[in-house]
Amino acid sequence: MNFGLIIVGDEILSGKREDKHLPKVIELLGKRGLALSWARYVGDDPQRITADLKHAFSSGDVVFSCGGIGATPDDHTRQCAAAALGVPLALHPQAHALIVERMQDVAREKGLPFEPERADNLHRLNMGTFPAGAQIIPNPFNKIAGFSVGNVFFVPGFPVMAWPMIEWVLDQRFAHLHQSQAQSEKSVIVMGAMEATLTPLMESIEAAHAGIKVFSLPSVDHPQWGAHIELGVKGAGAALAAAYAELLAGLGRHGAKLGPELVR
């Protein structure tokens, strides 16, 4: 199962806010022995959001979408999700009840009467209108639910809300995918080598070791090592150790000059 991430918001693309979701989702997946396959950033453009969500729904991947599920004019994700699916928006009864609870809590905290028919309170109910048939994702921060359709999961842009909601999805819906052995990496710095020369070695290691990926990260101006390649393998358990041993042996046969070894 592949995992994808969509991050919505003009504020990210303009640089007004720095995205924190990408590294956090990578971390949350990694703790469960899982990995992110792809990520996309999209501004507050309904046409582009709808196109990205159509891809997400049709991909078969588990996709998290962060941002744009509020009820202000620049929030389009709920509407775009419905358009991508070709279904109407509908007020979700459980989401509705949770929004009412939240409004009651706020009124109580402020010592004010709860006025459910007040215009701003009626407007807040829009945050519970989801594509017809959606399921809710509980929000432990303020009860305002996210939603899911199939394997696409929609959470707010606020990290304090989004991250525990994503963890809930991973642990409640996809615990069966968690790996007992988390993926890790082993690599070595190879001084002055050419990638083209080492490509046959990389291909032979991937072919010989199922579940192992070989990576090559060249650098031309490192302050300590100068021009070099960080060459390594990704995987788990005994397969990783065997593939790395074969990589080092192959580099030895090439007469490569090796620097530090790295483990992540």
Image (cartoon, rainbow, N blue to C red):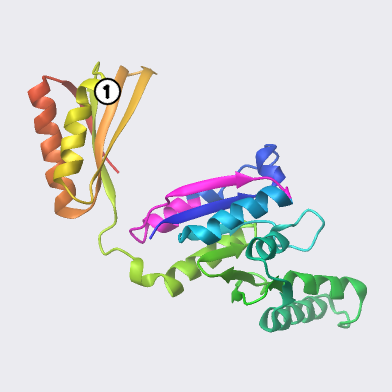
- In reply to whether residue 29 is colored magenta, the answer given is yes
Is residue 122 shown left or right of residue 42? Answer: right
Q: Nearer the viewer, residue 38 or 249?
A: 38
Query: In the displayed structure, would residue 83 be above or below residue 215?
Result: below
- Mark 1 Cα within 10 Å, few/some/many (few <14, many 20+)? some
Quadrant housing the N terminus: bottom left
**Percent position of residue 9, x then y:** 68, 48
Task: Say which of 170 and 52 sits in front.
Answer: 52
* Amino acid type, residue under disc 1 in the picture: Glu
Q: Which residue is mark 1?
A: 195
Residue 38 is covered by the magenta coloring: yes
The residue furthest right is 118
> From the viewer's perspective, is 62 left or right of 257?
right
Give x and y (percent) for residue 147. Answer: 61, 70
**Residue 225 visible to the viewer:** no
In the image, residue 112 sits, relative to residue 215, either above or below, namely below
| 161 vs 35, nearest the viewer | 35
Count up the numbered dots. Answer: 1
Q: Tell me, yes or no, if residue 212 can be seen here.
A: yes
In the rendered image, residue 34, in percent from the top left (x then y), is placed at: 36, 57
Q: Residue at x 92, y 77 (%)?
A: 118
Quadrant of the image containing the C terminus: top left
The quadrant where residue 67 appears: bottom right
* Residue located 72% across and 71% down the image: 88
Up-down relation of residue 116 to residue 155 (above or below): below
Disc 1, SS? helix
Q: Which residues are magenta?
A: 24-45
Task: State the image coordinates of residue 58 (x, y, percent, origin top left).
Answer: 52, 60
Q: Is residue 256 above or below residue 200?
A: above
Residue in the picture at 69% in, 79% down: 92
**Viewer-nearest residue: 11 or 63:** 63
**In this picture, residue 114 sits left or right of residue 259:** right
